[in-house]
Amino acid sequence: MSQLIWNGLFVGSFYALVALGYSMVYGIMKLLNFAHGDIYMLGAFTGFAILGAVGGISPGMALPALLGVLVVTMGVTGLSGVLLERVAYRPLRNAPRLSLLITAVGASFTLEYGMRAAAGADPQVYPLRLGGTSAEILGARITLQQIALIIVAVALMVGLNLLVTRTREGRAMRAIALDPRTSALMGINVNAVISRTFFLGSALAGAAGVMAGAYYGKIDFLMGFLIGLKAFTSAVIGGIGNIPGTMLGGLLLGLLESFGTFWLGGEWRDVFAFGVLILFLSVRPTGLLGERVTERV
Amino acid sequence: MGKSRIAAVMSLAAAVGLLTAGCGQGLLGGDSQAGDGKGPIVLGMLIPQSGSEAAIGPYMKNAADLAVEEINGKGGVLGRKLELKVADDACDAQTAVAGANKLVTEGVQVSVGGYCSGATLPTLPIFGKANIPMIIPAANSQELVDQHLKHVFLINGTGSQQATAAMAWITKRGAKSVALVHDNTSYSKDIAVRTQKLLDEPGGPEAAILEAVTPKESDYSANINNILAKKPDFVYWTGYFQEGGLIIRQLRQSGYKGAIMVGDGSVSEKLASIAGDAGEGVFATMTQTPDTLQGAEGWVASYTKKFGSAPGPYTNQAYDGVRLAAEAIKNAGATDGAKVIAALEGIDGFQMFSGPLKFTPDHTLSAGGFQILVVKSGKFALQDALK
């Protein structure tokens, strides 16, 4: 039982980290950025390239080295997110929603198959592995590395939440989410704030990509697709646009999958997890912590 | 302004459409000529060049190219040159159907492709309707055999032959409780279910669990939790290497100490590199590979010289597929589908990497030729020939 919970929380924290980018962008621009999962993939490959360039790292230095790579990668994927917004989304800001959605799908394919052209279709193996043997804690097999990764993930999420709720920047983001036009009239530079939102979301996805690469060891150009869908689902469960809700949604999806596999077997896992999702949304369409959108007149 | 631009684009598109249609007719014209006994004999090969199994495609294409080159060097078949046309199936049913239709319109006379069973299955009727014999080098799900189609020939061991080999090794190892893990694709599930049936027979080892995983994920801890709960002493993974490497690694990380074996779709050095240290000592059920072949050093050397890398999985089958097609056309004295099929059925003792060839009434190899390999310092080496 505790093993199931731990497995669910561990996977869920990856979902949550990726889901935050979805949720923030949707909250501000009402855009489903389908290329977000591919930013996660980009992060994994960036980390791979950096580690390859740096060369041999002794096992004792693995964790500190990885933290360094994590920070650099977050910068790189953050800037890629900004570039993506500038090139693919900003010119369509006033276009119909549907055009924007299709552009996002197009951006996703561009990133995926661009990476295939650049790095090849073969899966790559991370040069630095966070392996380690597991220890039994409260009846669950837990590795030190898992704990380290969860701590990093939680720290990033708490940091983001503080940034959005406590800083001027965060206040500007929330203002734009409520009403972009009035925000602009109040002297907020809407374009700059949206760029920074993309930076933050993409940096978090990049961090998740590096962590997944180092923990699981295998990366490939399509790795962002499935987790992108799962992250989107997490965001909807938790209430898309709401940051604590999105984190909660990610953890909940991880737990649903873990228990679904246990109760019904592997082939029924997704049926169970997504069945629960449909039921849940029919009862509470705004998600766990999402607020009912009141019609503004 | 906007409207006139759209109109311009549309007329341009129409013009391009007409042009390509014209080209298509030109191509078809050339093919009817080929059917008359002039021009090259065209072989078609449907292999994954993109998608999850894209790594396999180049190996098979290189091997087929090598065979075509050798045969043409000796004057071709029936006085005509061979020509290979390749289409991508992306290991995906829809892409495969599109690719098969493309090959048929390009006037292919024998199909020598097929790696993923799930992608090969929907192409059977397409080639069948066009009266094109299929020599399938790698795909080996029992479903390909069970339809008893006259134009389908398999030169790789089948799922049931692989399950029998797996069972033989499980018994030989003295395992008691076996966990079977598959990825729900037709190929993978077929081997797992067949092995389970063999295990369910009274006496001998028992099947502990039949677990399905979702391909393309990273975290399989939930599945592994299910597997470990049954306390097996042998785990058999029948899917492909990408998930296989992760599952092996995560099994070992969770403290599993028993034996692990993988099916032929997982035999790739990438499996060992993804699994890392955990991959050492992993067994595999596999038909002969260039590494385990006796007396193939000359062939391996000429392949390596031509393509700059050592031959990979299914290179020998792809190479043999082309050679077999040429042999059958030669024996038939024509490229007509029915005559080539009769010639294939009549072949007896044709030398291939898997041994002298004679098809069973089901159009499969009379002996599967499966062996047990083991991972040693990151490479698959022969463990037991199961003879």
Image: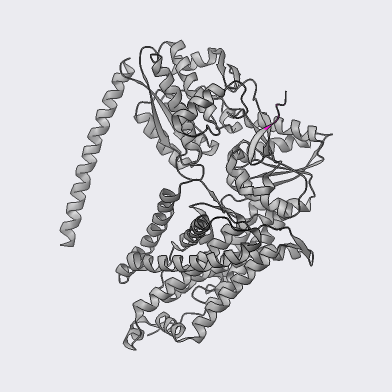
Question: Can residue A224 be seen in the rendering of this structure?
Answer: yes
* Residue drawn where x is 55% and y is 78% of the image: A159
- Whether residue A102 appears in magenta in the rendering, the answer is no
Question: Residue B60, position in %: x, y?
Answer: 48, 32
Question: Residue A59, position in %: x, y?
Answer: 65, 59
Task: Tell me how the rendering is colored.
Answer: one colour
- Name the foreground residue: B214 vs B79: B79
Vertical order, A48 against B317 (above or below) = below
Q: Quadrant of the C terminus of chain B?
A: top right
Question: Can residue A288 be seen in the rendering of this structure?
Answer: no
Vertical order, A6 against A191 (above or below) = above
Vertical order, B84 against A106 (above or below) = above
Count of numbered labels shown in the rendering: 0
- Name the foreground residue: A63 vs B285: A63
Q: Residue furthest bottom?
A: A186
Quadrant hosting residue B234: top right
* Region in magenta: B382-387
* Residue drawn where x is 56% and y is 74% of the image: A156
Judged left or right of residue A65, residue B83 is left
Vertical order, A155 against B380 (above or below) = below
Q: Residue furthest right?
A: B203
Question: Residue B296, position in %: x, y?
Answer: 57, 22
Q: Quadrant of the N terminus of chain B?
A: bottom left
Judged left or right of residue A197, residue B183 is right
Question: Residue A284, position in %: x, y?
Answer: 56, 73
